[in-house]
């Protein structure tokens, strides 16, 4: 070692001591800084961080309520809940996604579409460690296979949840509506608290109208989660309250019979219990399988449904608006009686056509021929009903003031929504001069009265409204508003206390009885010779074991221009007339009233009449057989 | 005669014992973690007691060799090291993998002390420049690995010697001003992740799920502990995995959460006691080398404590500095205990 330069150990020690003391003071100061920082965090700001730490680990999760069940009047379930199993993947817990998916494909039926949808959803912003669905609706076998292989598949979860099930599928699609997945627009309108755990909401029909009661109240549970989102412990649970179960007036068996009677034809049947106003059957054909909207409907399937020319998603029973045609004649007749324009005895001459004074336009009867023969001859009101004389009602239409026809028709619930609990029903249209000026910008012509008399022109009704009208005639003016609800396990907030609507004023009791008699003749007056039988007798009246009152009608789809000749066969099927038939039975003590519409069916008596008879038979024959 | 320092050993044992208890909780009562830490501590204590038996003269003589060897190994790491997490810090030897930069934490202060040992103090400008070179060359090699945190700590350990040697205050002031002026320039030399760590320091909420997550969860853990803590094994932040690195670099947050401010204060006071005891030893030493070395090792030890405790509470950017003698794993405990061994040797050989 080189010789040490001069070092004064005493001075150096003093220097070192000085530095060591300063260093110690520095250490003390810095320790104070640390202590101060921790004092700040742990004592002064403790509350902030305590809350933050609790928010980290405690999560309140909503629990979905189970949806109320829907039964028919016989206790048959029309809408129930079933468990479905879903396969989900927690991406963060999987090292090799492709490998996992390959493994899963050996166990469950995985389509490329499933994987694509999963990848789309997985790419969205989401909480780390949250499961993303890979496949819904696993079969029981798949669930079992996954359970057995569970240990080999970390990050793969199988969960179950309840979904709606409609055991009858298409049969009640239009009455019940269906639940559908909540979309963004629904989400904005729904109460986020109540629907926090709910994926589906009732759309259309009973599911929509009674949504609030069927839905129930969600519960909640507080859970402790770790940083990966895994639940470590459940802290407390407030169980959900299930929705109310409800029973409908609908009679499962009658619905089946009505649907069968209509068969493959497009159309609608509404059948009402005349004693209560309860809707026993409501059919709209074609329908669709509401379960598709629960389990997921593909874009193609939905497009096919929504763009079909037969409009299966369209509920004809409440939204189909058609001219009532001759089924409106009993109302016009009663209006004429009420306003003193005609009497039961008055007779007019029906030559098969009608002309307004000083006008050239010819209004034809349905029996008019090119040879200008036809007509019903001498016609009184009864004959005008059972022969469905147009000329009689053209004439009566012109005798009445248009506002009187409209006002009288509205007493039967036409032009308004009178059903107690039918969601989204259409109001139809009862035209009058003020309406015409406002809507069409035209004045009311005398010719409008002519058309009004036979239920054509701007007048529009739905099958539900015509069934309601039939019920009112059956009850001789008493108005029981139609309704779907029979009972529920608890009173429902949506169902207002049932009050009878005001009865139809104007017709005398005798008028009602004679009108019912005339409508009985439509069905029962037979074997009287050519031109003397009820219009429907040949089709349904020959062998009927009970007294049925009815009235046929045809609604024009395209207007037939003046002087133009046409052949029904040549008209495109979709431009043919709609066939109507309204009926109730037994005529003296009515139990069932109904309206039948066959779209583009042609003749009311020949096409819609037999359908009405079949439904009526299905309801009454078992009772008659029991007696 | 057996050379040791019973009071210092007792204080170290208290820190270690306390640390093992906290680690048992932080590692979710994993006995394997505890066992492996016990083995490491046992090895460190053995190294310490052996180091205490060697006289300071021995250290003085072998310092240049040890220094050269350490620098050479660190240089070797740069060319032949094992890359872990993007940094080349490890040297793979048959049977063990080891981090030569740890050796520098001892070699650098030893070398600077050796250099000042036979020179008049306070040092002149020439000696200062040589001493700085001794610090900065190895520190630069470590920064190149890249391991900025350890590099700074290595430089700091050398700087501590220079400071204790009587560095004129005007130089200290000048160096601080220079560092302040160089900071904006240095910013551009930082890696992106390093910049992010510094930015996070100023605004931990800016990216609460990314870079700020660690700090935000750590302060939440500490703050939620309150004065008395949630109780051992009852920390929700650590046991539900919200707190990252809870058994290694962030273990002070577990102490804060489970034992509260009282627990943190207890550890800080233990560390302070150790610092006081060691500075006392340094002031008793007769020779320049032993005085400067023991003083610098003590200050470096405190710097580790300060940097760790400050970074976990969000006062400093996150650098990979474990909490001395408490954090799990790494070779730092062995190096630290070796350092305390040297201090014990100096204590036991007061006459030199």
Image (cartoon, rainbow, N blue to C red):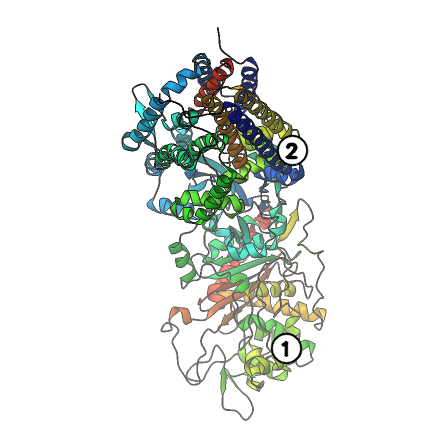
Q: Position of residue A408 (x, y in %)?
A: 66, 74
Residue A431 vertical placement versus A183 (above, below): below
Give the secondary structure at mark 1. Answer: helix
Q: Which residue is mark 1?
A: A405
Q: Quadrant of residue B54?
A: top left
Residue A543 vertical placement versus A571 (above, below): above
Q: Quadrant of residue A23?
A: top right
Q: Hey, which residue is sitting farthest bottom in the picture?
A: A358
Q: Position of residue A502 (x, y in %)?
A: 72, 66
Q: Which residue is mark 2?
A: B226
Q: Hey, which residue is sitting farthest top in the picture?
A: B1
Residue drawn at (55%, 88%), measured in percent from left and top? A356
Give the secondary structure at mark 2. Answer: loop
Residue A172 vertical placement versus A29 (above, below): below
Relative depth, front residue between B261 and B336: B336
Relative depth, front residue between B308 and A298: B308
Q: Hey, which residue is sitting farthest front in the picture?
A: A6
């Amino acid at each position: 070692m080189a010789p040490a330069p001069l070092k004064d150990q005493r001075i150096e020690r003093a220097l070192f001591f000085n530095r060591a003391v300063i260093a110690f003071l520095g250490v003390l100061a810095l320790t104070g800084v640390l202590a101060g920082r921790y004092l700040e965090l742990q004592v002064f700001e403790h509350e902030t961080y305590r809350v933050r730490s609790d928010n980290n680990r405690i999560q309140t999760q909503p629990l979905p309520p189970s949806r109320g069940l829907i039964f028919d009047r016989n206790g048959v379930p029309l809408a129930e809940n079933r468990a479905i199993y879903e396969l989900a993947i927690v991406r963060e817990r999987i090292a090799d996604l492709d490998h996992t998916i390959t493994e899963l494909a050996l166990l469950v039926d995985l389509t490329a579409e499933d994987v694509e949808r999963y990848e789309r959803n997985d790419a969205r912003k989401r909480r780390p460690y949250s499961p993303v669905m890979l496949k819904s609706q696993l079969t029981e076998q798949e669930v079992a296979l996954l359970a057995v292989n569970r240990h080999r598949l970390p990050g793969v979860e199988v969960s179950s949840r309840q979904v709606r099930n409609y055991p009858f599928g298409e049969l009640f699609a239009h009455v019940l509506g269906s639940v559908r997945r909540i979309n963004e627009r629904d989400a904005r309108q729904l109460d986020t608290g109540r629907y926090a755990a709910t994926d589906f909401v009732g759309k259309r029909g009973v599911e929509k109208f009674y949504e609030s009661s069927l839905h129930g109240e969600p519960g909640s549970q507080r859970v402790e989660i770790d940083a990966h989102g895994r639940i470590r412990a459940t802290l407390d649970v407030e169980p959900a309250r299930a929705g109310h179960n409800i029973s409908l007036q609908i009679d499962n068996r009658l619905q089946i019979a009505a649907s069968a009677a209509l068969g493959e034809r497009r159309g609608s049947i509404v059948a009402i219990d005349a004693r209560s106003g309860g809707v026993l059957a409501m059919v709209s054909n074609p329908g669709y399988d509401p379960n598709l909207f629960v389990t997921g409907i593909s874009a193609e399937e939905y497009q096919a449904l929504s763009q079909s020319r037969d409009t299966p998603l369209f509920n004809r029973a409440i939204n189909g608006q058609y001219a009532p045609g001759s089924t409106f004649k009993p109302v016009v007749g009663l209006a004429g009686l009420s306003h003193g324009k005609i009497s039961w005895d008055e007779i007019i001459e029906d030559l098969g056509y009608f002309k307004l004074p000083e006008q050239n336009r010819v209004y034809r009867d349905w029996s008019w021929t090119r040879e200008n023969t036809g007509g019903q001859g001498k016609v009184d009101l009864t004959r005008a009903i059972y022969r469905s004389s147009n000329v009689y009602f053209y004439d009566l239409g012109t005798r009445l003031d248009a506002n009187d026809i409209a006002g009288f028709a509205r007493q039967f619930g036409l032009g308004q929504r009178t059903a107690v609990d039918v969601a989204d029903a259409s109001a139809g249209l009862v035209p009058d001069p003020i309406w015409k000026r406002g809507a069409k910008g035209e004045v009311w012509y005398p010719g409008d009265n002519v058309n009004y008399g036979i239920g054509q022109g701007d007048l529009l009704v739905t099958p539900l409204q015509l069934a309601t009208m039939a019920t009112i005639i059956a009850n001789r003016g008493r108005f029981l508003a139609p309704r779907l609800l029979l009972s529920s396990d608890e009173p429902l907030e949506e169902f207002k206390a049932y009050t009878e609507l005001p009865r139809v004023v104007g017709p005398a009791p005798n008028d009602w009885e004679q009108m019912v008699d005339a409508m009985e003749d439509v069905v029962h007056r037979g074997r009287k010779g050519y031109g003397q039988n009820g219009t429907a007798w040949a089709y349904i009246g020959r062998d009927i074991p009970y007294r049925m009152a009815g009235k046929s009608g045809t609604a024009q789809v395209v207007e037939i221009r003046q002087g133009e000749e046409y052949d029904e066969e040549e008209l495109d099927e979709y431009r043919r007339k709609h066939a109507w038939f309204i009926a109730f039975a037994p005529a003296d003590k009515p139990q069932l009233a109904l309206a039948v519409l066959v779209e583009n069916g042609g003749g009311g008596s020949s096409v819609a009449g037999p359908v009405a008879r079949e439904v009526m038979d299905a309801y009454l024959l078992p009772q008659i057989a029991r007696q | 005669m057996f050379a040791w320092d019973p009071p210092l050993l007792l204080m170290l044992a208290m820190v270690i014992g306390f640390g093992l208890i906290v680690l048992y909780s932080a590692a979710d009562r994993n006995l394997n973690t505890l066992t492996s830490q016990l083995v490491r501590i046992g090895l460190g204590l053995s190294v310490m007691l052996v180091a205490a038996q060697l006289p300071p003269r021995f250290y003085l003589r072998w310092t240049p060799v040890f220094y050269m060897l350490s620098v050479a190994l660190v240089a070797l790491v740069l060319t032949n090291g094992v890359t872990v997490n993007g940094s080349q810090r490890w040297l793979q030897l048959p049977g063990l993998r080891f981090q030569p930069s740890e050796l520098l934490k001892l070699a650098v202060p030893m070398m600077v002390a050796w250099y000042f040992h036979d020179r008049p103090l306070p040092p002149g400008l020439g000696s200062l420049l040589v001493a700085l070179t001794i610090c900065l060359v190895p520190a630069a090699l470590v920064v190149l690995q890249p391991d900025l945190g350890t590099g700074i700590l290595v430089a700091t350990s050398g700087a501590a010697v220079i400071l204790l040697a009587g560095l004129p205050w005007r130089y200290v002031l000048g160096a601080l001003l220079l560092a302040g002026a160089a900071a904006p320039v240095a910013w551009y030399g930082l890696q992106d992740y390093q910049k992010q760590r510094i930015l996070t320091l100023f605004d931990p909420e800016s990216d609460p799920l990314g870079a700020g997550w660690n700090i935000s969860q750590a302060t939440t853990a500490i703050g939620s502990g309150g004065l008395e803590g949630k109780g051992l094994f009852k920390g929700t932040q650590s046991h539900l995995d919200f707190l990252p690195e809870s058994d290694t670099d962030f273990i002070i947050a577990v102490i804060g959460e489970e034992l509260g401010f009282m627990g943190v204060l207890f550890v800080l006071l233990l560390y302070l006691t150790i610092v006081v005891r060691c500075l006392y030893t340094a002031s008793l030493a007769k020779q320049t080398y032993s005085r400067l070395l023991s003083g610098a090792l003590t200050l470096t030890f405190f710097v580790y404590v300060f940097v760790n405790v400050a970074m976990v509470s969000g006062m400093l950017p996150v650098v990979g500095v474990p909490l001395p003698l408490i954090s799990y794993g790494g070779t730092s405990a062995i190096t630290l205990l070796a350092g305390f061994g040297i201090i014990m040797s100096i204590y036991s050989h007061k006459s030199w």
